[in-house]
């Protein structure tokens, strides 16, 4: 089997990924796909079909939803607690000047959109900073074409991953130009459980792929790795299995909305402007074009008629109704950014949380899965450059926001908490946590840091009120 042959389940998912990518990219990508997502008008010329497509309005609910959901997870800055030796890496986790926070955000976007993302931990023998250190290389769903697991010692262990890459090389015909080429990176465990990498390329960019260069056996402290340092990202459990994108139904409705919009705009183009008509014109043999306007008179015979042809009927109304219905369907499927959410003045914070608990459960699952995968790659990086015997032994913690609603504490609640603090019934740490969770304090500022700020500005904390002083302890 050639190295570029994808797995069967990859082939089955490829069309879904292609659709998700096109809908997320927007109007131009959907139009470029032609009849794949937009049926052709019957007997339409190419020019008429282009005009039909160009009149449609594409409402990119998918992109707005992905952006909104990612914003919910990263509305609070993520925390990455890693060993001291690994902290400098977080400022440039890929050796391409991408910090860990931005890398995590991009990975989350891919997981929400495609339900699949992959990260390979590599060791650089030499970096722009003059050091040897691990770094990350990411792969989208489309570029992870093959994989295999085996049961070793009762655990499913990743034993093969085939990754498609498109590096650029100098053009043989023009030394001032570069061109992309197709190559495959094969990660495998051999019979002795040694991790090996092998590149595959076409010798002359045609024909079959063949091994390119020598196989590489990455080492840690002079010993080969006994596992493949590749991590799969997914919306739930981070396994190699392909899962349906969380927002695939939203993409389907978005395309249906697009088709309705094209039909609606085409109909408006054909019938929106009233058209004048005349019959029984005196001197009817005159082929000259009739003029219309306040200073123009048409002379009609006895039974002659003149008027305006205008569209009547429910055809256009049904298209308008279909557009509105699909917008509501998109809102139900997750595109809450499409419409204003009603706010009830008397609604309590508990009621708000209960009303939204179901729709945010999936997002919370994604955030927890992302924490798991991000922790795994940071553990692998730190282990490769450390002394621990196993990656799981490395003390790494990743914390992403899972409080997506951020129901702000009411002034009365803050006043009560302040009075309790002044009475000595709670600690300042507890009070500061209440302020942070209630949206009244700065993000990523600890209680100790806030106390230091207070010490620089005396008398910031007001004295106890008379009511608080009387509290029995």
Image (cartoon, rainbow, N blue to C red):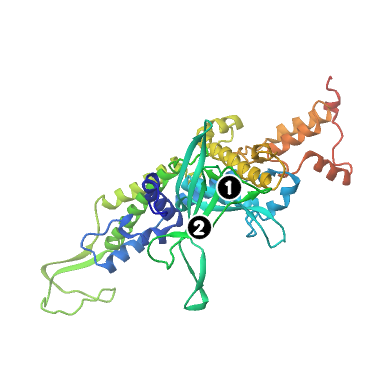
Q: Nearer the viewer, mark 1 or mark 2?
A: 2
- Identify the residue at horizontal 71%, vertical 48% (top origin): 86
Residue 458 occupies which quadrant of the picture? top right
SS type, badge 2: strand
- Identify the residue at horizontal 38%, vertical 47% (top origin): 252
Residue 465: x and y, percent? 84, 31
Q: Is residue 29 left or right of residue 313?
A: right
Residue 427 seen from this side: yes
Residue 296: x and y, percent? 25, 76
Circle 2 crowding by C-alpha within 10 Å: few under 14, some 14–19, many from 20: many
Q: Is residue 312 left or right of residue 128?
A: left
Residue 82: x and y, percent? 71, 44
- Identify the residue at horizontal 83%, vertical 41% (top origin): 451
Residue 235 seen from this side: no
Residue occupied by mark 1: 71
Among all residues in the image, which is located at the extreme top?
Answer: 472
Nearest to the observer: residue 141 or residue 38: 141
Q: How many marks?
A: 2
Q: Is residue 468 left or right of residue 326?
A: right
Q: Quadrant of the C terminus?
A: top right
SS type, badge 1: helix
Q: CA distance from mark 1 to mark 2?
A: 37 Å
Residue occupied by mark 2: 199
Residue 241: x and y, percent? 45, 40
């Amino acid at each position: 089997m050639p190295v570029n042959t994808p797995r069967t389940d990859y082939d089955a998912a490829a069309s879904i990924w292609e659709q998700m990518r096109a809908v997320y990219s927007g109007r131009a990508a959907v139009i470029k796909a032609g009849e794949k997502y937009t049926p052709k008008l019957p007997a339409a010329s190419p020019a008429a079909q282009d005009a039909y497509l160009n009149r449609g309005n594409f409402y990119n609910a998918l992109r707005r939803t992905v952006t909104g959901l990612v914003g919910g997870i990263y509305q609070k800055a993520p925390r990455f607690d890693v060993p001291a030796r690994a902290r400098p890496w977080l400022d440039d986790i890929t050796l391409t000047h991408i910090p860990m926070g931005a890398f995590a955000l991009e990975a989350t976007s891919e997981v929400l959109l495609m339900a699949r993302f992959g990260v390979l931990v590599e060791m650089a023998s030499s970096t722009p900073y003059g050091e040897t250190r691990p770094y990350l290389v990411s792969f989208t769903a489309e570029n992870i074409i093959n994989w295999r697991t085996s049961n070793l010692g009762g655990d499913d262990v990743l034993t093969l991953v085939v990754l498609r890459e498109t590096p650029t090389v100098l053009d043989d015909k023009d030394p001032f130009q570069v061109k992309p080429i197709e190559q495959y990176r094969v990660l495998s465990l051999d019979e002795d459980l040694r991790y090996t990498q092998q590149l595959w390329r076409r010798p002359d960019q045609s024909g079959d792929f063949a091994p390119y260069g020598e196989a590489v056996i990455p080492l840690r402290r002079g010993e080969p790795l006994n596992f493949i340092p590749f991590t799969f990202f997914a919306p739930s459990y981070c396994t190699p299995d392909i899962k349906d994108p969380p927002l695939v139904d939203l993409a389907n409705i978005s395309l249906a909305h697009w088709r309705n919009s094209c039909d609606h705009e085409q109909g408006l183009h054909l019938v929106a402007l009233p058209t004048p008509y005349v019959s029984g014109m005196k001197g009817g043999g005159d082929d000259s074009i009739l003029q219309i306007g306040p200073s123009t008179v048409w002379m009609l015979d006895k039974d002659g008629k003149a008027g305006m042809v205008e569209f009547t009927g429910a055809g256009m109304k049904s298209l308008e109704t279909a557009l509105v219905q699909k917008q509501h369907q998109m809102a139900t499927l997750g595109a809450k950014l499409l419409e204003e959410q009603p706010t009830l003045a008397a609604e309590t914070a508990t009621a708000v949380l209960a009303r939204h608990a179901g729709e945010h459960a999936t997002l919370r699952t994604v955030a927890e899965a992302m924490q798991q995968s991000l922790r795994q790659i940071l553990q692998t990086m730190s282990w490769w450059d450390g002394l621990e015997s196993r990656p799981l032994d490395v003390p790494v913690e990743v914390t992403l926001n899972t409080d997506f609603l951020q129901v702000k504490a009411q002034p009365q609640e803050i006043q009560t908490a302040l009075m309790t603090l002044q009475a000595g019934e709670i600690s300042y740490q507890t009070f500061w946590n209440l302020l942070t969770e209630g949206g009244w304090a700065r993000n990523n500022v600890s209680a100790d840091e806030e106390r230091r700020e207070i010490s620089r500005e005396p008398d910031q904390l007001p004295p106890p009120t008379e009511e608080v002083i009387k509290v029995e302890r």
